[in-house]
Image: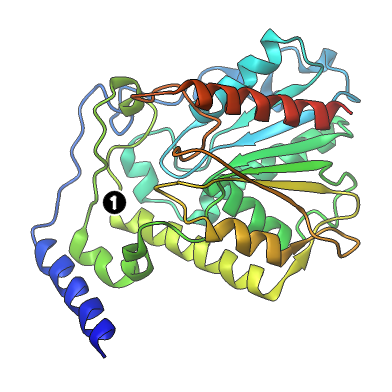
Amino acid sequence: MKKRYLLISTLLITILSGCNIVPVKYDDTMLDGPVINDTSLVDPTFRVSSHPDRATFDRTRPVIICVHGYGACTYEWEEFRDYVINNDIPVYTSLVLLGGHGRDIEDLIATTWKDWEKPVMDEYDSLVKMGFININFAVSSTGGAILIDYLSRNAFDSKPVKPENIFFIDAIVVPSNKLMTAINVLGPVLGNSPSEMNNPLAKAHWYTNRPSSSLVQLHDLCDLCRQKLEKGFRLPDCTYAKIYKSENDGSVDPISALMMYKGMFKSDGNRVDIQMVQSDLHVFTRLHARDYVSHADSVLQQATFKEIADKVTD
């Protein structure tokens, strides 16, 4: 009874404190506004399917589709793309921008999570149509939830090409902020939950504003993934998957990784691989636009990049 009272009290305090709805505000230095947009919208080299030299690409070379998280953009995976290029690794990277992201904040408000995930499968289908036979995924945060949705409904089973490898980086199923579980109720009251970002580079690549309508969409996607994982599902034939999870992640509860490990199986029924990593960062593979990066963070990022590249080119 006492715990229930404390929960109700917390919710009431939250509701009352949120009665003054925070308006959506932005300026020309922020991704939220009309001036700054994701680079992939004007640079066709970000995606393999739109690359100017795609006709000359080796169709047997592995392609890794990189998918970012909620409120982010393709910048989240640029360091991995640069790692592949700088180390002359025989892999193509295709950085996909989620629907409604990387544009004005109004675009995010107007979209659902189904709109967010559509460009991911569009790119996959385009690569298959182009003749690529080795297609892989590296997904972070909400990008991971999107792959869980696709996998749980067997979206790849009818494809002539199945994913070879899928690497999940801090995929979200259960958020660290437990108030997210009540966002459908609190959302209309909260209105907007701006993130506190002082880094100018971060403001240019992540939305500062987090309108409640978009958080409701994120909640609904996470809730769906949780339900699918509780039922359990198998990966497509011969698809390898590995879960990487930061142990001290302020955005995604580590239980997300455990739920994925218990609910997602290889096609033969065996469990997928999982690795809990010593990190305080959400999406520990992205170090740019951080206020502080330790030597350990850099070592972990490079080791993870190498492991992904080695597995895909093995």
| Residue 108 appears in the picture as rendered | yes
| Residue 153 appears in the picture as rendered | no
Q: In which quarter of the image is the N terminus?
A: bottom left
Is label 1 in a helix, a strand or a loop?
loop
Eyeballing the image, is 126 above or below 11?
A: above
Eyeballing the image, is 309 above or below 237?
A: above
The residue at which mark 1 appears reads as 211
Q: How many labels does the image show?
A: 1
**Is 38 on the left or on the right of 9, as rendered?**
right
**Residue 36: percent from left, percent from top:** 34, 23
**Residue 110: percent from left, percent from top:** 38, 51
Residue in the image at 21% along x and 78% along y: 6
Residue in the image at 34% along x and 21% along y: 201
**Residue 190: percent from left, percent from top:** 20, 60
257 and 26: which one is in front?
257
Eyeballing the image, is 9 above or below 298?
A: below
Residue in the image at 21% along x and 57% along y: 191
